[in-house]
Image: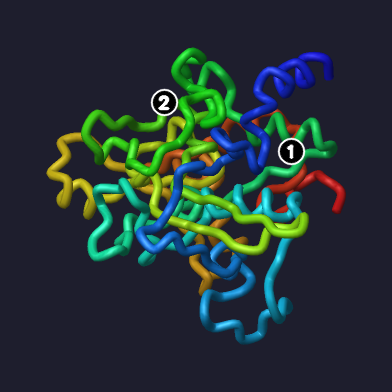
């Protein structure tokens, strides 16, 4: 705990939701040409933007600071593609609009969470071992250890941009530019614009929370001389147990299919009790 507290104290300004220069996972300078702000249905995933049918929230939306922080993290991970607010200073904006750059990182994945017997086990089973990721700790740092976010695209698609340096960088990748607006002790409005674009090809070394599949279509499109791997998304028309073999290396080998995933690290420990709700043999329900 001493180590954690010392780290949080060192970076406390970067975890302040309303810091004037470095608000948490936000861009302090974010503005539109008309200086507009927008309702929170652009941030809250369970209130469809403009079509609030079957939503449990009604009326003027507002959030506590704690819940707003959670939706902020969610937006960077799962925000869908689409037209966003046009940020002043973003060179990609046309006619005041930010045109689609793709879904946020976690939206590409067929998410897999391995459950251990305790919270400690669950955290350890879902983190990449240092010898697997081969990360550079000097380069692979979270967004709050980098320079404050600006409106410009900092990804590899931009001039002098960059790709994720490792799993820590990937897990905190700023897919959007966001600024929360508070009134009366609650968050009441938001600006949400495009952030750093990110495509999913060949990131299996940094991302263990999905199965991966080789894509010959991507290889043709990219004219790649080396194999291209894509996240294996869940098929909503298929029962989860029917896709279990994609997570088990032995089953994939027996079927003669080439797949990349991190399940061999989990299965070899013998300490995991479930993955995606599937109970491994020999464990109690």
Please name the residue that numbered disc 1 is placed on.
Answer: 272
84 sits left or right of 137 in the view: left
Between residue 210 and residue 141, name the one nearer to us.
Answer: 141
Residue 279 image point, x, y percent: 75, 52
The residues tagged by marks 2 and 1 sit, at their Cα atoms, a distance apart of: 28 Å
In this view of the protein, can residue 232 be seen by the observer? no
Q: Which residue is mark 2?
A: 165
Q: Classify residue 18 by image quadrant.
A: top right
Q: Crowding near pointer 1: few (<14 within 10 Å), some, many (20+)?
A: many
Please indicate whether residue 115 sits to the left or right of residue 251 in the image: right
Q: Cβ–Cβ below 8 Å for labels 2 and 1?
A: no
Q: Which residue is at a point 86% across and 49% down the rendered structure image?
A: 284
Residue 11 seen: yes
Query: Above or below — where is 188 with respect to 266?
Result: below
From the viewer's perspective, is residue 270 above or below residue 231?
A: above
Q: Secondary structure at mark 1?
A: loop
- Left or right, 279 with reference to 132: right
Q: Position of residue 38 (x, y in %)?
A: 53, 67
243 in relation to 224, above or below: below
Point 81% across, 37% down: residue? 119
Q: Residue 36: x, y in percent?
A: 46, 64
Which residue lies most toward the left here? 223
- Which image quarter holds the N terminus? top right
SS class, disc 2: loop
Q: Is 7 rendered above or below residue 64?
A: above
Dot 2 surroundings within 10 Å: few (below 14), some, or many (20 or more)? Answer: some
**Residue at image point 75% right, 16% down:** 6
Q: Nearer the viewer, residue 148 or 104?
A: 148
């Amino acid at each position: 705990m001493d180590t954690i507290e010392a780290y949080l104290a060192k970076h406390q300004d970067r975890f302040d939701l309303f810091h004037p220069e470095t608000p948490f996972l936000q861009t302090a300078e974010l503005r539109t040409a008309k200086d507009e702000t927008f309702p929170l249905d652009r941030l809250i995933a369970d209130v469809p933007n403009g079509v609030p049918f079957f939503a449990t929230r009604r009326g003027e939306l507002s959030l506590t600071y704690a819940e707003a922080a959670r939706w902020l993290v969610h937006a960077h991970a799962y925000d869908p593609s689409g037209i966003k607010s046009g940020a002043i200073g973003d060179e990609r904006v046309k006619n005041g609009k930010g045109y689609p750059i793709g879904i946020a990182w976690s939206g590409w994945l067929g998410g897999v969470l391995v459950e251990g017997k305790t919270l400690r086990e669950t955290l350890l089973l879902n983190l990449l071992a240092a010898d697997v990721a081969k990360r550079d700790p000097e380069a692979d740092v979270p967004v709050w250890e980098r320079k404050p976010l600006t409106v410009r695209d900092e990804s590899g698609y931009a001039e002098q941009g960059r790709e994720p340096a490792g799993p820590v960088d990937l897990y905190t990748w700023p897919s959007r530019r966001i600024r929360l607006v508070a009134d009366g002790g609650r968050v009441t409005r938001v600006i949400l614009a495009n952030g750093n674009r990110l495509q999913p090809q060949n990131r299996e070394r940094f991302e263990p929370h999905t199965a991966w599949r080789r894509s010959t279509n991507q290889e043709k499109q990219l004219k790649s001389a080396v194999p291209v791997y894509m996240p294996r998304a869940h098929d909503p028309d298929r029962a989860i147990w029917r896709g279990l073999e994609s997570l088990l290396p032995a089953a994939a080998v027996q079927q003669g299919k080439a797949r990349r995933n991190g399940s061999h690290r989990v299965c070899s420990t013998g300490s995991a009790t479930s993955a995606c709700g599937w109970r491994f043999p020999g464990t109690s329900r």
